[in-house]
Amino acid sequence: MDTDGPAQDLVADVFARDCTSRAAFEDVTSKWASLVLVALGEGSFRFNALRRKVDGVSEKMLSQTLQTLERDGLVLRDVVTAIPPRVEYELTALGAAVAERLRDLADLLEASASQVETARRDYAGR
């Protein structure tokens, strides 16, 4: 028996079907979650402001996405006791680290939009 490394069941492997990291990866890389994380990387938002920022997301989908990200420890939901009461969403430290990497990806894709358009035209022309 090899005792030099961690037990195999303790090793996170995003390629393993039942690994927590894979489930979190799937959550983070959903279309809406990625956009929500990038938006929250700019600061905290109230629900409707976040919905306006992430153009096209329905109220139901945004609510489900925020719940998933909160469950995974990426987003904090803060109920502010004021009149009227309000709810704000912000990133946890882990959420900020993930959002930073997603922002890098978003920046790369925004800078490459013309290349993508050209590739799409070429593909459609085949």
Image (cartoon, grey):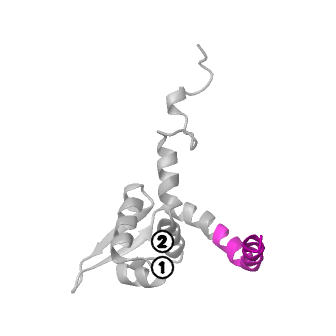
Residue 50 left/right relative to 96: left
- Work out which residue is located at the far front of the displayed protein and give it: 126
Q: Amino acid at mark 1?
A: Val
Q: Give the quadrant of the C terminus.
A: bottom right
Residue hosting label 2: 36
Residue 82 in the magenta stretch? The answer is no
Whether 70 is drawn above or below 10: the answer is: below
Residue 84 image offset from top left, x and y in percent:
22, 86
**Camera-side residue of 69 and 125:** 125
Residue hosting label 1: 54
Q: Which residues are the magenta region?
A: 104-126
Residue 47 image offset from top left, x and y in percent:
36, 78
Q: Main secondary structure of the magenta part?
A: helix
Q: How many marks?
A: 2
Residue drawn at (47%, 49%) of the image:
23
Residue 118: assigned label: none
Residue 98 image offset from top left, x and y in percent:
56, 61
Q: Give the quadrant of the N terminus.
A: top right
Q: Residues within 10 Å of mark 1 (few under 14, many from 20)?
A: some
Whether 27 is drawn above or below 52: the answer is: above
Q: Amino acid at mark 2?
A: Val
- Work out which residue is located at the far left of the displayed protein and give it: 83
